[in-house]
Image (tube, rainbow, N blue to C red):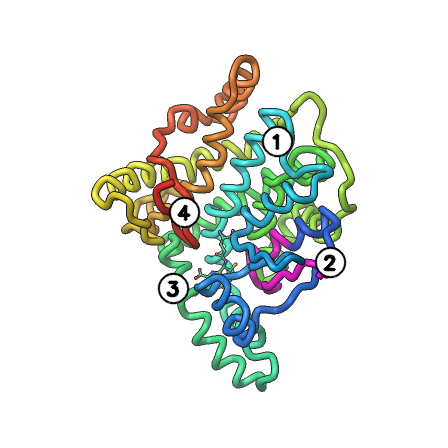
């Protein structure tokens, strides 16, 4: 067994596979990637994980890891060396928040652009991944079936027709902010990628850089963001430093501000609903979605599923924030206020949560 590399089961078209792949490359951990065909789902993923999901990482000792955050955290513990978590408080909290934003909020533009601007291409890609030996016609047929739930998920995540223009305006706003940031920084927090970079890379690579129409758009309107995607794709392993003196550049505060405006009200509403649900169903695992809730983008109101899992992601940032005392706490509070993050300071935490597959349960 010794010396056998890690096996990453995933796909080029997959948001969270991109995040883990980029991490493994930066961390210089040897791995083989295996495309998640129907056969791989049947023979490897379902028997070990119990449900259909990618990415899944099998360690050289046979340990099976699922969920990009838990995969990365397990490897951070076992591999040491330069960490993707900054050791200083402002940078560390910024990294945790931006991971949550990339993982859980940028799914809205990523799913919208894929399923409303690149649909047939994506159906073909799903088909060729699932049935690599089939003909292009058979692959399209399979892809249409396999992709149907994902295309519906785009709408359930908030991309109803009346929200399309707002989603695109918000995404272009984010690209403009990131473009300004990358004028002076190779990565979010200096010249080394942090957990925040890997969180943003999921949507910005697999969907927004790689899907043909989205990629053409990204390269045209935000070439500096496309260049950051390329740096993340082909990193200099283990190199670089975070900015000195725990600096979170002002250009990155603009991105945090967008997160606080767009995602934080949804997280606060989710926390209220999850607390109520847990009160009414003591000890039970929450469903993946508990009803629909309102959200606002660029002044337009839409509705989307209420996702308890997003709170498990936020809980990591909340735990870190609550652990801070003295001048570390003061420094972080100042950063949050400068980025419009009053709502994070006043956030009412739900009861403790543990991850349960793609949802959560009492922790
Ligand atoms: N939060 C998980 C989510 C994994 C995930 O959502 N993977 C997608 C593909 S990128 C998937 O397999 N989804 C199946 C489903 O939603 O049922 C992670 O960080 O790995």
Q: Earlier in the sequence, mark 3 or mark 1?
A: 3
Q: Earlier in the sequence, mark 3 or mark 4?
A: 3
Q: Which label sits in the foreground, 3 or 4?
A: 4
Q: Earlier in the sequence, mark 1 or mark 4?
A: 1
Q: Position of residue 36 (x, y in %)?
A: 57, 69
Residue 169 sits above or below residue 188 on the image = below
Is the C-beta of the residue carrying label 2 under 8 Å from the nearest atom of ligand 1?
A: no
Secondary structure at numbered mark 2: loop
Q: Position of residue 91 (x, y in %)?
A: 61, 29
| Label 2 sits on residue | 2
Q: Which label sits in the foreground, 2 or 3?
A: 2
Q: CA distance from mark 4 to mark 2?
A: 35 Å
Secondary structure at numbered mark 4: helix
Q: CA distance from mark 2 to mark 3?
A: 44 Å
Q: Which label sits in the foreground, 2 or 1?
A: 2
Residue 100 sits above or below residue 86 on the image = below
Query: Image point 53% across, 13% down: which residue?
Result: 326
Q: Position of residue 213 (x, y in %)?
A: 58, 62
Whether label 2 touches label 1, CB < 8 Å:
no
Secondary structure at numbered mark 1: helix
Is the C-beta of the residue carrying label 4 under 8 Å from the nearest atom of ligand 1?
A: yes
Q: Which residues are magenta?
A: 1-20
Q: Is residue 18 left or right of residue 170?
A: right
Q: Label for residue 309? A: 4
Whether label 4 touches label 2, CB < 8 Å:
no
| Label 1 sits on residue | 251
Q: Position of residue 229 (x, y in %)?
A: 67, 50
């Amino acid at each position: 067994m010794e010396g056998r590399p890690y096996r990453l089961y995933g796909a080029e078209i997959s948001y969270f596979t991109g995040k883990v792949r980029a991490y493994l490359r930066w961390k210089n951990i040897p791995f083989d990637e295996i495309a998640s065909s129907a056969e791989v789902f049947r023979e490897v993923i379902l028997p070990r994980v119990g449900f259909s999901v990618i990415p899944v990482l099998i360690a050289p000792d046979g340990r099976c890891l699922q969920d990009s955050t838990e995969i990365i955290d397990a490897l951070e513990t076992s591999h040491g060396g330069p960490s993707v978590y900054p050791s200083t408080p402002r940078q560390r909290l910024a990294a945790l928040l931006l991971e949550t934003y990339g993982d859980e909020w940028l799914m809205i533009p990523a799913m919208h652009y894929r399923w409303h601007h690149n649909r047939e291409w994506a159906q073909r890609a799903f088909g060729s991944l699932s049935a690599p030996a089939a003909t292009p016609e058979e692959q399209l047929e399979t892809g249409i079936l396999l992709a149907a739930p994902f295309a519906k998920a785009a709408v359930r995540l908030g991309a109803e027709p009346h929200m399309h223009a707002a989603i695109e305006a918000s995404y272009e706003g984010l690209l403009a902010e990131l473009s300004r940031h990358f004028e002076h920084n190779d990565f979010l927090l200096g010249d080394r990628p942090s957990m925040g970079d890997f969180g943003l890379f999921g949507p910005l690579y697999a969907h927004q850089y790689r899907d043909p129409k989205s990629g053409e758009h990204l390269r045209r309107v935000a070439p500096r963001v496309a260049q950051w995607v390329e740096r993340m794709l082909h990193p200099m392993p283990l190199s670089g430093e975070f900015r000195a003196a725990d600096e979170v550049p002002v250009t990155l505060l603009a991105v945090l501000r967008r997160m606080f405006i767009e995602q934080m009200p949804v997280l606060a509403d989710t926390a209220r609903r999850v607390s109520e649900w847990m009160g009414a169903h003591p000890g039970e695992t929450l469903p993946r979605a508990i009803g629909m809730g309102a959200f606002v983008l660029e002044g337009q109101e839409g509705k989307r599923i209420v996702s308890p899992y997003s709170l498990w992601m936020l809980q990591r940032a909340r735990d870190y924030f609550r652990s801070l005392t003295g001048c570390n706490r003061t420094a972080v509070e100042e950063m949050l206020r400068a980025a419009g993050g009053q709502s994070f300071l006043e956030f009412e935490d739900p009861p403790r949560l543990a991850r349960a597959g793609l949802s959560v349960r009492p922790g």
